[in-house]
Image (tube, rainbow, N blue to C red):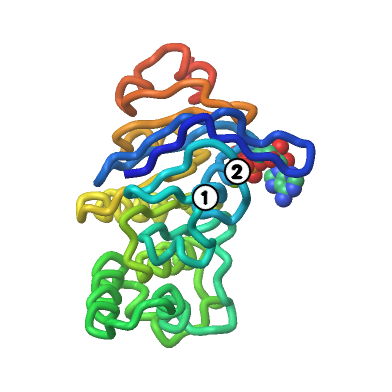
Amino acid sequence: MLELNQLSASYGKAMALESISLNVMPGELVAVLGPNGAGKSTLLKAISRSIDSHGVLRFDRHNLHEVATERVVGLGICHCPEGRRLFPELTVLKNLQLGAYLRHNKAAVAADLHKVYELFPILQERSQQMVSTLSGGQQQMVAIGRALMGSPKLLLLDEPSVGIAHRLKMEIFKAIRQIRDSGVAILMAEQDAQSALQIADRAYILEHGQVAQQGLARALANDDHVRKIYLGIA
Ligand SMILES: Nc1ncnc2c1ncn2[C@@H]1O[C@H](COP(=O)(O)OP(=O)(O)OP(=O)(O)O)[C@@H](O)[C@H]1O
Ligand SMILES: [Mg+2]
């Protein structure tokens, strides 16, 4: 469904992604792990065409380099960015509706709103509340919900658990798993490698903009080298 081959990207002269090869199959939950500055966010931005890149970048038979940035969402790639980028002075409902701004089928949009509320019941309770009054974890739910309102085939999640209390974090990871089970493929950047490996099918570990390790999540979680270097477990 998603295929990257020797993909590179840079900010000015600084190389941020170097020859990345990665793929995501339909319905898969794939984690992108690695330390600060490894290139995780840059990778997701390259896929959603928020930044330029070079190399093979294909999605569902389309060459994404040839797709205008504003058409990427229409193809079914929805990006839930780092730092959430919500509209804090608008209500929860308004923020969610903004995720569907390109869609014209009102019944389908209403059905997806219903699904988001099923996934995160607290958002229905708080639908008329300003986003700025929600907790960090609840705001993350809005950000994921907004991306779902674009009706993704592939959901790009950038650090969904960062800065969130443990209980809400577990709730969010459970919801991510449910989204995958509903048939949406997910590529998720995450600092909490241990938790991510528990829910992901496969994972790539980035270091200095390159793929340092990759494999089945379970195998990586049990690999001594990975445990020591990336999970901090002796
Ligand atoms: N807008 C930018 N301009 C210049 N350099 C950038 C920009 N954004 C990121 N970089 C650099 O690109 C590299 C990769 O950054 P990126 O944000 O992709 O890392 P990350 O893995 O998402 O890190 P974090 O875990 O801190 O979110 C870093 O060296 C970073 O300093
Ligand atoms: Mg990042």
* Mark 1 residue crowding within 10 angstroms, few (<14) / some (14–19) / many (20+): some
Disc 2 to disc 1, C-alpha distance: 8 Å
* Mark 2 residue crowding within 10 angstroms, few (<14) / some (14–19) / many (20+): some
- The residue type indicated by label 1 comes to His
Q: Work out whether 131 lies above or below 233.
A: below
Residue 36 position in % (x across, y down): 64, 37
Residue 95 position in % (x across, y down): 47, 78
Give left or right: position of 105 versus 20.
Answer: left
At horizontal 28% and vertical 40% (from top left) the residue drawn is 25
For ligand 1, which image quadrant applies? top right
Q: Which residue is mark 2?
A: 53
Residue 126, labelled with which disc?
Answer: none
Residue 65, labelled with which disc?
Answer: 1
Q: Nearer the viewer, residue 152 or 206?
A: 152
Residue at the limit of the structure toward the front, as seen here: 66
Q: Nearer the viewer, mark 2 or mark 1?
A: 1
